[in-house]
Image (spheres, rainbow, N blue to C red):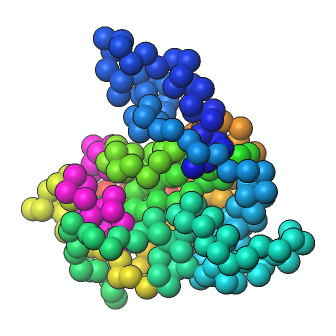
Amino acid sequence: MLNSQSAVREIVDSHIEKQNVVPLVRQAALLGISRASVYYVPHPLDDRDQRIIRVMDELYTKRPYYGSRRMAKDATDILKEPINRKHTQRLMDVMGLEALYPKPRLSWNGTASFRFPYLLRGVTAQHPNHIWGTDITYIRMRQGFVYLTAFMDWFSRYILSWEISITLDVSFVLDAARRALVIANPEIANSDQGVQFTSNEYVSLWNSDKTKISMDGRGRAMDNIFTERLWRTIKYEEVYLKDYATVREAKENIGAYIEFYNTGRKHQSLQYKTPAEIYFERR
């Protein structure tokens, strides 16, 4: 799938012992990689596709409403080489992208196990843990990319938890959700209708007496606007300034940025306080 996974494959092949008495899940955790990585077999992209994907990444971050036709045209103009629409569609599929009208394919689920109504139309977060939002985005690397998920408190913009994975396996979303729930229980947990969020495993995490589940409507890019803004901020202020060579490097740098985002980055919308200040002083 992704050339960037070769670095993870090397870690798995050289460090993971499948006959070890230590469980594979524990070995993967000690190495800082997701458990899905242990079983993942990469299918590399060639250098040309890597160049195209990097351009598409920036185009999509600026204009998430772009479909494959516009994406192909702008990528052709930027790279000065012909890129047809079918090729663009294939790469968008690899990246998990679709125009925001519908949502990114990370969010698309034609056979959802559970679906819940969108509860936030006309609703504004009034205090910490009133509304949490979550989503998945891709993070580009020197070769290929990884996936990032996060849980954010909408009132304070505080990132409660996050996780990186080389696949879209539901386990990394579950891991992030469990860590967030150690901190608190939200009144409303909002996500899209992706297979990760409509799975029985994800829905079962939430205490229905404390938390209502809300899901974005398909074709409504603004339903999860705070998380969409977070992705853009992380990419412009961190990812696009770096050139991660390994998954571990990506994880360490993004982790450091999220710590800064929470505790050091003052937001004008928060009266120039940090998300951590608002979240913990108002709880």
Which residue occupies the foreground of this view, 281 or 32? 32
Q: Is residue 201 left or right of residue 139?
A: left
Which residue is depicted at the point 70% across and 61% down?
53
* 257 w.r.t. 115: above or below: above
At horizontal 62% and vertical 57% (from top left) the residue drawn is 234
Q: Position of residue 274 (x, y in %)?
A: 54, 57
Q: Please tell me in which quadrant of the rendered image residue 61 appears.
A: bottom right
Q: Quadrant of the C terminus?
A: bottom left
Give above or below for 275 relative to 9.
below
Q: Residue at x 67, y 70 (%)?
A: 87
Q: Tell me where residue 273 sits by quadrant.
A: bottom right
Asked if the magenta segment contains residue 95, the reply would be: no
Q: Residue at x 34, y 88 (%)?
A: 122
Say whether residue 73 is visible.
yes
Query: Eyeballing the image, is 26 above or below 233?
Result: above
**Label tally:** 0
**Residue 5, image x and y in percent?**
59, 40
> Can I make out residue 161 in this image?
no
Q: Which residues are magenta?
A: 176-202
Q: Provide residue 256's location: percent of width, then percent of height.
A: 60, 41
Q: Considering only vertical position in the picture, is 208 above or below 145?
A: below
Judge from the rendering whether residue 44 lies leftward or rightward of residue 242; answer left or right: left
Residue 112, horizontal then vertical, whole percent: 26, 69
Q: Residue furthest left?
A: 209
Left or right: 9 in relation to 35: right
Return the residue nearer the eye: 123 or 223.
223
Name the outermost residue toward the bottom.
122
